[in-house]
Image (spheres, rainbow, N blue to C red):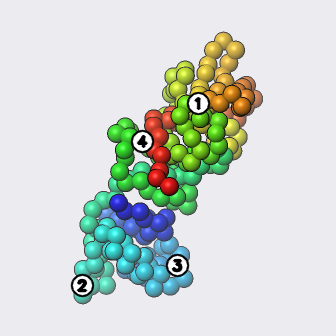
Amino acid sequence: MLNLTAQQIKVFDVIKESLQSNGYPPTRAEIAKILDFKSVNAAESHIKALVKKGVIEKVPGSSRGIKLVEEISGIPLIGSVAAGSPIMAFENVEKTIHSNPLNKSVDFFLRVQGESMIDAGILDNDLVGVRKTRNVENGEIVVARLQDEVTLKRFKKDSSGIRLVAENKSFSDIKIDESSDFSIEGKAVGIIREDL
């Protein structure tokens, strides 16, 4: 199981981009310049880590001697679902989950914070698999954005409007009115409980 750090993913992406655009990999100096590293040694240490993790290989005797072993495929875990801004940006990628145990189409994972969904079997610290979509059905569990906060709730729409319903009696529903800065980011398609 490859667990690359955010910086290692960035270095890998620079190498991959250069191979796709130019047909050859970048030098250590180019990687350092693109990623604003203080020294070429920083780029070299990330390359060594990527070699160790088996995603690239060094080709001896060449300043550009790097080749990809395989595409990194994986699903990013991009922060927490109680609050914050899940943006598909590397700064927010906590890690990449390489085996998708849900066997469903998942665009990203979010870590659940809080207990508002425990009656739906979603516990604090679970990873919820999210498929990006704006089209959700009544009763589905969704990731909704209110202003700058992101929440995981059950979507209910009826003649009185939209409500985001908690699956825990201790929490109140959130009523959405026309003045709310509200959007659906996606729907929950499953959860993973990590072995802690």
In this rendering, position of residue 84 left or right of residue 140: right
Instruction: Name the amino acid type tagged 3.
Output: Phe
Q: Farthest residue in the front direction? A: 196
Q: Distance from label 4 to label 3 (Cα)? A: 33 Å
Where in the figure is residue 59, as x and y percent of width and height? 24, 80
Viewer-nearest of discs 2 and 4: 4
Instruction: Name the amino acid type tagged 2.
Output: Pro
Q: Distance from label 2 to label 4 (Cα)? A: 39 Å
Q: Distance from label 2 to label 1 (Cα)? A: 57 Å
Disc sitting over residue 106 in the figure: 4
List the residue tagged with mark 2: 60
Q: Distance from label 2 to label 3 (Cα)? A: 24 Å
Looking at the image, which residue is at 50% across and 35% down?
A: 188
Instruction: Name the amino acid type tagged 1.
Output: Asp
The earlier-in-sequence mark between 2 and 3 is 3
Where in the figure is residue 154, as x and y percent of width and height? 59, 28
Looking at the image, which residue is at 34% across and 70% down?
A: 53
Front residue (pair 74, 133): 74
Quadrant of the frame with the N terminus:
bottom left
The earlier-in-sequence mark between 2 and 1 is 2
Q: Distance from label 3 to label 1 (Cα)? A: 47 Å
